[in-house]
Amino acid sequence: MKSISKKTKRRVTLGDIPRVGPGTPAGGWFRRYWLVVGVARDLYDIPQAVKVLGEELVLFRDPNGRLGLLGEHCPHRGTSLEYGDIEDGGLRCPYHGWLFDIHGRCLEMPAEPKDSKFCQKVKQLAYPVRELGGLIFAYMGPDQANPPPLPQYAPLLDRGGQRQIEPVRRADYNWFNFFENSADPAHVCILHRHAGYGQQSWGDHFFCYTDMPHVEFVEMNYGMKVVMTKPGPRPGTEFVDEMSLALPSIVQVGDTEFVHAKMDAAALINAGSQCEHWMFVTPNDDDHFMLFTADNYLGPVENFFEKLKEMRAKETPIQEVKPYDKRKFMPYKGNVRKEDIMTQGTQGRLGERQEQLGVSDRGVIKFRKIVLNAIEIALAGKRPKGVPARAAADAVLHLDTQVGVRAAQSSKVKIKN
Ligand code: FES
Ligand SMILES: [Fe+2]
């Protein structure tokens, strides 16, 4: 007799995760969230072209200061609205003067007969846009008249302390290589031993290459967190360093003060980290993404971000580049960000590359399942992790990312599967 497998067959596979264009499973999932599409201070009085999830769009503020995100190409004969004029209540195409408001309604067609109703039949693609804490978010999913709440991400809210939005970073490889890298803490001790993580001294050289921390991976309501621990300075204590991955594409790293700001570890370990460092990944398409970074520092150090910038500037690659060495990513050793770009930028897309995973890849394996589940939930028309319930629209969204010394507890952490 044939046995019937109880396992439900997945509708999506690992190879679906990197592909985010219109009509794809992961593209449909991504479109259930508000996504960062720009930095408010970088949007001047001219339109800004931006590609998001494979769609060519143009971001602008209309003459009344309202934000708009329209399809980039004019529906008349395709000229880019990136070169359009912001005037008369909207964005005007320079070719034949069709004028669009932020809702995509066509307001004028100067060359058409005065009594023409053609204008009323034309609608340009338009997405809702909101601003929060200096970042510009767009919603490209279903039910645009009634989008889900824009999450109240903690570092974007004014809770006192110092805040900063870093200049946008851009990369030319698949977004998921960046995202799932944070579910792989082994690389921190190995790849980054040449840079900030190798040089940090707190926690008995927490990320030591030859004595790596104990790691656990905990599924959270927002995604997953990586819990790294080592025996603490006193009996019954432990050093802890956590990282969070929040869906659809947010990473929080909690150890900025120790690793990059190189602040006095002894003075800090009991207070723990007071810098929330969040990175929002927005795919332009399957081979390019933008990285928006928001920080909120709640500690006592004045001009914290200026000091951090100075320290980061000192993190230059230490690697000798021989005259005949023409490799694209050289030099990279000695700078955490360059080390990551080289490794992630040469992997190829998940689902297309060959892999052989070991025990130390269990965080990556677990995280991929969490993402696949979220994609399937979105495909089924339900609310995936990371989209707030309407009843919780005003709740501040914190990621549970602790760094410092605490009572030993990691062995008691119940890992939910
Ligand atoms: S192409 Fe834009 S108005 Fe003609
Ligand atoms: Fe890294």
Image (cartoon, grey):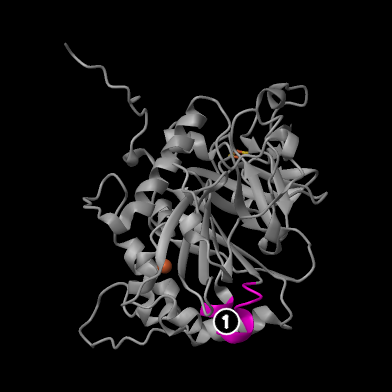
Q: Residue furthest front?
A: 235
Q: Quick one: 189 or 164, which is closer to the camera?
A: 189
Residue at figure coordinates x 40%, y 73% from the top left: 338
Residue 38: horizontal and vertical position, in percent?
A: 62, 56
Residue 180: horizontal and vertical position, in percent?
A: 41, 54
State yes or no: residue 146 in magenta: no
Residue at figure coordinates x 52%, y 63% from the top left: 242
Q: Quadrant of residue 264?
A: bottom right
Q: What amino acid is labelled 1 in the image?
A: Ala
Residue 131: horizontal and vertical position, in percent?
A: 73, 52
Residue 288: horizontal and vertical position, in percent?
A: 43, 54
Q: Is residue 74 above or below residue 60?
A: above
Residue at figure coordinates x 58%, y 64% from the top left: 402
Q: Quadrant of residue 326?
A: bottom left
Look at the numbered disc 1 and say if its residue's Cβ is closer than 8 Å to ligand 2.
no
Residue at figure coordinates x 33%, y 80% from the top left: 331
Q: Residue furthest right?
A: 64
What stretch of residues is rendered in magenta?
257-273
State yes or no: residue 272 in magenta: yes
